């Protein structure tokens, strides 16, 4: 998707492409975890409609400050410096999911920050509890 930018139209196309490839895997019986910033509800819902029964929305509810601290590519820094336009959370909105199947928070009220590994475990535990990790019957 290197031909796409941060415009709303390109973001929509990016998520559409990701959804199509993910659907191919799901149709082949392969569990696929897809990690992308998808800022617009309508784009996520379009993928959900294309993958009925196979789509689990996991909302990673992480403050932007933590995202900036964990940014290995330095994209937030570039966006703050005005070098990237239309960057989610900086000069473009993020539409929180209304009813995600799963919400993972980086920190519960009054507790220490969760590690990326502990947050990943929460996702695996959810998938296991819902039967996604069971082998073929």
Image (tube, rainbow, N blue to C red):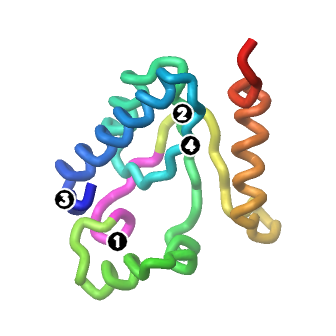
- For residue 2, side relative to residue 53 (left or right): left
Q: Distance between the Cα atoms at labels 1 and 4?
A: 26 Å
Provide the secondary structure element on which disc 1 rests: loop
Q: Residues within 10 Å of mark 2 (few under 14, many from 20)?
A: few
Quadrant hosting residue 87: bottom left
Q: Residues within 10 Å of mark 4 (few under 14, many from 20)?
A: few
Q: Which residue is mark 4?
A: 33
Classified by dominant secondary structure, the portion drawn in magenta counts as loop
Closer-to-camera residue (128/66) = 128
Q: Is residue 25 above or below residue 11?
A: above
* Residue at (73% x, 30% y) in the render: 133
* Residue at (80% x, 70% y) in the render: 112
Q: Distance between the Cα atoms at labels 3 and 1?
A: 22 Å
Provide the secondary structure element on which disc 3 rests: loop
Query: Contact, CB < 8 Å: mark 3 with mark 4?
Result: no
Closest to the camera, between mark 2 and mark 4, is 4
Q: Which mark is residue 3?
A: 3
- For residue 118, side relative to residue 42 (left or right): right
Q: Distance between the Cα atoms at labels 2 and 4?
A: 19 Å
Membership of 89 in magenta stretch: yes
Give the mark nearer the N terminus: 3 vs 4: 3
Measured as percent of width and height from the top left, residue 56 is found at 56, 32
Give the mark nearer the N terminus: 2 vs 4: 4
Q: Residues within 10 Å of mark 3 (few under 14, many from 20)?
A: few
* Residue at (44% x, 52% y) in the render: 36
Q: Which mark is residue 103?
A: none
Q: Which residue is mark 2?
A: 99
Magenta-highlighted residues: 88-96
Q: Which mark is residue 90?
A: 1
Closest to the camera, between mark 1 and mark 4, is 4
Which of the image's four quarters has the C terminus?
top right
Give the mark nearer the N terminus: 1 vs 4: 4
């Amino acid at each position: 998707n290197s031909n796409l930018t941060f415009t709303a139209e390109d973001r929509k196309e990016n998520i559409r492409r990701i959804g199509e490839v993910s659907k191919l895997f799901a149709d082949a019986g392969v569990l696929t975890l897809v990690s992308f910033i998808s800022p617009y509800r309508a784009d996520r819902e379009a993928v959900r409609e294309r993958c009925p029964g196979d789509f689990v929305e996991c909302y990673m509810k992480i403050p932007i400050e933590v995202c900036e601290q964990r940014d290995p590519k330095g994209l937030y820094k570039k966006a703050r410096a005005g070098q990237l336009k239309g960057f989610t959370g900086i000069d473009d909105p993020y539409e929180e999911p209304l009813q995600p199947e799963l919400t993972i928070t980086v920190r519960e009220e009054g507790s220490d920050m969760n590690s990326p590994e502990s947050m990943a475990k929460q996702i695996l535990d959810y998938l296991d509890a819902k039967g996604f990790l069971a082998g073929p019957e």
